[in-house]
Image (cartoon, grey):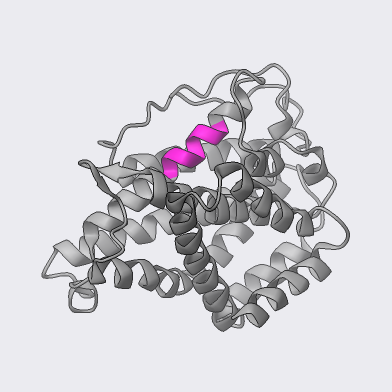
Amino acid sequence: MNICEAPDLSLVKDGRYADSSQPIQSNLNWSSTLSLSQLRQQLEYLETQHSLTGDSHAYFLSCYIVSMKRCEYLIEAIRNSDHPEHALCADLDDRLIESIASYFSYYYFSAYEAVLSSGKKRVPNPWALALNSDSVAKQSPLHGMLLGLIAHSCYDLPLVLSETTSSGSPLYDWSNADHKRTYLEISKLLVEELPVIGRNIESTFGSMRRRGLVKGGVSIRLVSYLLRSGFFSRIVFKVLTNVHREALLNCHRLQRGVLSVDALADLCCKRMSLFTQGSIHVNVVKAVFQVLVKS
C-alpha cells in the first residue's frame, strides 16, 4: 500500500503550519506478515506528520499507538512464562489479539490511503467524516480524536470480525470460549492504559503548541487530567464494553445478511454526527449518557 501525494490535502487544513501544502505520505505495503511493532511504527510516523501540521487527527493516532503497544505487551505476557503478568493473561488467545490488531490496522490504513488518493478510491463514509471533513477543522481538537475512534471501533471492527479469515477460518470463532473471553477482556485491558492515553494526547498538544500550530488547549488538558486521574475509568470501561459487544452483534448481522456494509456505515455516521454539530462538550455528555442508558 502506498499512501501517495495529494496536491490539496484536506487532512491538514486545520493546521497552521507554513508548509501545510506539503502532503503527508508514507510507503507502507501492508501485509499480514508485518509485526505489530512494524505497524505501530507506521502509526507513530503518521502521528508525527499530523503533529507537524497541527492536524487534530494526531490525537486519534496517539490513542491508537497506546492500543497497539498494549496488544504487543499482552502477546508478550501470554507467550513468555517469565513475564510478570503471564499468570493473569496465560489463558487469553494471543493469536486472536495479534490477528485482530493486525487486520484492524489494515482497514485503517486502507481508508487513509483512499483519502490521500484524491478521489481515485472510494473512501468509506465514516472515514470521510473523520479524515476529510472541513467541519473537523472548525471544531475542538477533540473532534479529530473522537471521530477517528468511532469510525474505527463502530465501522472497521465489525468488518474485521465478519470479513477477515485466517487460514480459511473466520478470525473470530463464536463457539470458542477463549475467543469470547479474550475479546471481552480487551475492554478492561485498554481502560488500564487511560493514564498513558491522557499523557500522550497532552504531549501531542504540547508539541503542536510549541511550534505555534494550535492555541488554547483547556479541553485537552482537562481530558488529559481526567484520564490520568482515573475519574473516567468506570465510564470508559462501560462505553468500551458496549461498543465491543455492539461490534460483535453487527458482525453477526453482517454475516447473516441482515445488515449491509452501507447500512453499517450509515449507522456509524449518525453516531459521528453528534460530534460535528454544536458544542462537543454537550455532545460528549449526551453520547455517553445514551450508551450508559442502553446498558
Q: Residue furthest right?
A: 278
Residue 66 visible? The answer is no
Camera-side residue of 59 and 188:
188
Q: Which residues are magenta?
A: 105-112
Using residue 22 as the reference point, say whether residue 249 is left or right of it: left
From this view, report whether residue 184 is shown above or below residue 135.
below
Which residue is depicted at the point 63% across and 41% down?
127
Total marks shown come to 0
Relative to 12, residue 196 above or below = below
Name which quarter of the figure residue 55 lies in.
Answer: top right
**For residue 255: magenta?**
no
Horizontal and vertical percent position of residue 104: 42, 47
Q: Residue at x 44, y 53 (%)?
A: 256
Q: Is residue 166 left or right of residue 193?
A: left
Instruction: Give left or right: position of 43 versus 203.
Output: left
Q: Is residue 81 left or right of residue 164?
A: left
The residue under the point 71% across, 63% down is 220
What residue is drawn where x is 68% and y is 69%? 223
The quadrant of the picture occupied by the N terminus is top left
Q: Is residue 187 visible?
A: yes
Majority secondary structure of magenta residues: helix
Residue 269 in the image: above or below residue 121: below
Q: Is residue 108 magenta?
A: yes
Give the image location of residue 44, x and y in percent: 47, 43
Image-quadrant location for residue 88: bottom left
